[in-house]
Amino acid sequence: MLYVLNGTICVLLNDRTVEARKGALVYILSGTGYSFTVQSEEAHCLNLPTRAGFEDLVQLVGIEGRGMKKAPPGSFQEKTVDGGARSRLMAKIGLQELALTPILT
């Protein structure tokens, strides 16, 4: 996915060309060859790569927001997830879970 923060870009998706302006979200299907050029004086974009099946991982480990845009302070809920199920799903979609060490102790 490409999200255009500002400016205008021209995105080549295989043999199709799409013009994307500020606020556009261009979804690029897995396996699609793509490139882009800046059409305005300057442009800023976010490239948001996801693997096929990533949405399954979000459903497995995520907690429904119940319509809130931002969680109120102290409302974080830990969700218990079967480690084996998470590992199998991550292997299926080609992701690797890394153990992060705290920067500050």
Image: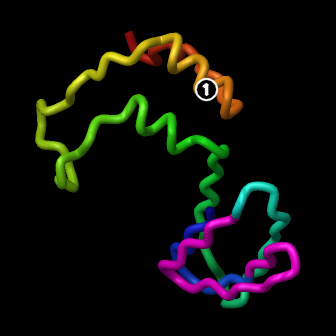
Q: Residue at x 64, y 59 (%)?
A: 47
Q: Residue at x 12, y 37 (%)?
A: 73
Tell whether 103 sits left or right of 18.
left
User: Which residue lies under the disc numbered 1?
Assistant: 90
> Residue 34, percent across and down?
81, 68
Tell whether 42 sits left or right of 25.
right
Q: For the residue carrying disc 1, how many other residues have a C-alpha within 10 Å: few (<14), some (14-19), or many (20+)?
A: some
| As drawn, 73 above or below 1 | above
Residue type indicated by callout 1: Met
Tell whether 54 sits left or right of 34.
left
Magenta span: chief secondary structure: strand
- Bounds of the magenta segment: 11-28
User: As rendered, which of 13 and 21 lies closer to the eye?
Assistant: 13
SS of the residue under disc 1: helix
> Residue 75, percent across and down?
13, 33
Q: How many tags in the picture? A: 1
